[in-house]
Amino acid sequence: MVASMSRKPDQELRRGWTTGACATAATKAALMRLWGGAFPTEVAITLPRGERPVFALAQADAGPDWAEVGITKDAGDDPDVTHGALILVRVRDHPGGVLFRAGEGVGMVTRPGLPVPVGEPAINPVPREMMMAVVAEAAAAYGRAPEVEITVSVPGGREIAQKTWNPRLGIVGGLSILGTTGIVRPFSCAAWIASIHRGIDVAVAGGESHVAGCTGATSERVVQAMYGLPDHAMLDMGDFFGGLVKYLRLHPVPRLTIGGGIGKMVKLAQGAVDLHSGRSQVDFAALAEWAGDARVAGANTALEAYEMAGAPLAAQVAQQALMRVQVTLRGAPVRADVVIVDRAGAVIARAGS
C-alpha cells in the first residue's frame, strides 16, 4: 500500500521483501527438509535482478510426506498492510510437475483480466517463476524430479485482504502473492498504479462499459451511487490521475467518470497528472482569472477560493478538468465526464456526458 508522501524522510528508507520473495524462500527451505532431510536456520534466494537476500525461518514443521516453512514478511519502511504477516509454504511430492494451491488467507481469482487465470490461486506469474526455479534447483541438488505441490498460506490473510483492492478485482478469500522484483521499495507509487492498471484490466475483460476514478472515499461513494456502478468498476485512482487515464488510452472503456473534491480537481484542471499535495500546487492567480474575482488570487486553499467565488468557479473548474481528461486520453474512444463534490458529499459541479 502507499503512504503519504507529503514530506521526504530524514534518512534513507529501508527496503523490504515482497510476499513472492518470502514464499520463494519458504519453498526453498521446505524442500531442503523434504528432499534433503533437514531444515536450514536461514535461506538465501536469487531475485530476478540478481540480489541475494537471506531469510530467517520463523516457523518450520514436517510430516511423513510434507514439509512446511514460514517466513515473516518484512516490508522495510514501507507501510505495507502485509508487513509482519507470516508467509507459510507447505510442499509435498506431486507427480506431473509443479502444482500451486491456495491455503488459508490466499485468494482465488474469480474474474478475468488479471495476470492469473480464473480458478487459479492468486499467486502472480513472477512469484510462480521464482518458486519453480527453486524447485528445479533443489531437484538437481538432491537428484529428484521437479514435481511438487506448493501450498501457500497467510494466516489472517482473509482479514488483511479487506484492506486491499483484492475484493474489487475479484480475488476472493485472501491476499495475492505478489512481486516482480522481489523487493519492496518504501513509499513507491508503483504498487498503487499497478493496482489501478489491474482494475482496468478486470473491467475490460468483464465487458464493463463505464468505470470511475475518484480521488477519495466521499467522491467515490457519490459517483458510485449516482451511476449505479458495481464495485469492480470503481478504480482506486487516488492522486494518480495520470496512471489511470494514460493506461485507459491503451485499454479503453466506453465511458469514464472522474470524481473528486474541489482541491484535487483544481489541480487536475490546471494540468497536473499527479494530484498529491506534495507534488502539485494550485495556481491561485489563474484561478482568479477563471473566477473573474481578484480576491481568489489571495486565497490560501482551493476550498477557500470556492467559498469566495461560489458555483461559477466550480463549474469552470469542472469544464477545465474535463478538457484535461480529454487531452490526456488523446483521442481514445472513451466518453468522459467530471463530478466535483464537497466534503459532505453534495455535487457542486458537473461537466461532460
Image (tube, rainbow, N blue to C red):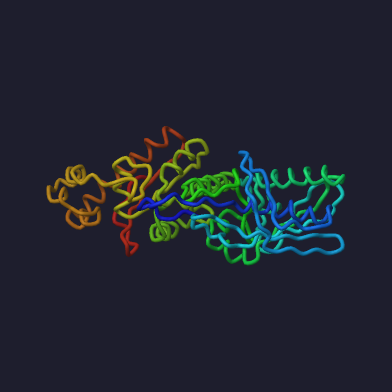
| Quadrant in which the C terminus is drawn | top left
Q: Left or right: 320 with respect to 293? A: right
Query: Horizontal and vertical percent for residue 29?
Result: 74, 54
Q: How many labels sit on residues?
A: 0
Query: Horizontal and vertical percent for residue 196?
Result: 50, 48
Query: Horizontal and vertical percent for residue 107?
Result: 65, 58
Q: Left or right: 16 with respect to 266? A: right
Query: Horizontal and vertical percent for residue 137?
Result: 77, 43
The outermost residue toward the front is 41
The outermost residue toward the top is 331
User: Which of the pair 228/107 is nearer the observer?
Assistant: 107
User: Which residue is at 34% across, 46% downward?
Assistant: 279
User: Which of the pair 115/52 is nearer the observer?
Assistant: 52
Q: Left or right: 39 with respect to 18? A: right
Q: Tell me where residue 59 sits by quadrant.
A: bottom right
Q: Left or right: 263 with respect to 43? A: left
